[in-house]
Amino acid sequence: MVSFCHIGNIVSKRMSENNQTTSEQSAPLVTRPKQKNAFLKWVVVAVLALALIAVVAIYKFDLLGGGVAPDDTSANALDANAIVAKSEKITVTRGELDEKIDQVRRSLPPDAVDPTQDAAFELQLLDDLISLKLLTVEAEAKNYTVSDDELNAEITLLVEQFGGQEALNQQLEALGISDEELRTNMRNELLIRQLLEAETTIDEVEVTDAEIAEAYKSTVGEAEDAPPLEQVTELIRSEIVNQKSAGIVQAYVDGLRDQAQVEVTLK
């Protein structure tokens, strides 16, 4: 499935932009081990709100001149308890999907085109929810656990990343996420992180100098103002690691989906 990998790609792009800004400010380049952990942090974004999808979705939506709006699928029009995807392991209700759609809407600038009116976007969001639920269930089935101390430490890091508790609270309020929901989502993120680190080969991803050189060449082309390869080597390396890791995780999720035989009933 392309859509699940889509989250990782968005976060990968965001990390590249952040790393580029850091480089321009002459700050130290991020080391490779931190990049591996950074890739896994896409799960945080996904389980918090799935809102980063809107960044790319808006771009595509504008290029296509808008999308095909689904039939009336608002929370008011449909039964929140109606099942839109199911298998023996998981179910996704209309209410859960609408909640994520609402969080995406809340994250949009006032003048932005609303991608949630595109039926394809709704299906993509549902696809991501299915994958995240399957990963969480698999982690629990394999008896991975998260202690309160581990959870609190991770939330403390999140507060620091947002620049303080007040800034984080404002973001959560804007997205309609309660403190309880945050803790649940973060616990699930930690479970999934353990699962991916133990059950996949993302820790073994290697990047050769030849791959870095080829990526540099294909990206900068003949641009005269391009930075020298030595200046962006670690940035390129981290991007390739992210891409390879996304492929590994995608393959793992595809296997879970094949086993689960999820039936999508969204209309």
Image (cartoon, helix red, strand yellow):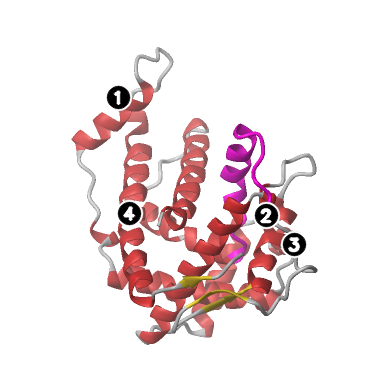
Q: Nearer the viewer, mark 1 or mark 3?
A: 1
Q: Is residue 67 magenta?
A: yes
Whether label 1 touches label 3, CB < 8 Å: no
On the rendered structure, is 227 left or right of 50?
A: left
Q: Residues within 10 Å of mark 2 (few under 14, many from 20)?
A: some
Q: Which residue is mark 1?
A: 217
The Cα atoms of the two marked residues, 1 and 3, are separated by 43 Å
Asked whether 211 falls inside the magenta stretch, the response is no
Query: Which quarter of the image is occupied by the C terminus?
Result: bottom right
Give the Cα distance between marks 1 and 2: 42 Å
Q: Which mark is residue 247?
A: 4
What amino acid type should be assigned to the residue bearing mark 3? Glu
Q: Image quarter for residue 233? A: top left
Q: Give the alpha-carbon distance from disc 4 to disc 2, as whole Å.
A: 30 Å
Q: Is residue 34 above or below residue 188?
A: above
Give the CA separation, mark 4 to mark 3.
Answer: 36 Å
Circle nearer the viewer, 1 or 4: 4
Please report whichever mark, 1 or 4, sits nearer to the chain's N-terminal start: 1
Q: From which residue to which does the magenta span run?
A: 48-69
Which residue is depicted at the point 75% across and 62% down?
A: 166
The residue carrying pointer 4 sits among few (fewer than 14), some (14 to 19) or many (20 or more) residues within 10 Å by Cα, namely some
Could one spot residue 44 in this view of the protein? no
* Residue 178 visible in image: yes
Q: Nearer the viewer, residue 212 or 58?
A: 58
User: What numbered label is drawn on residue 166?
Assistant: 3
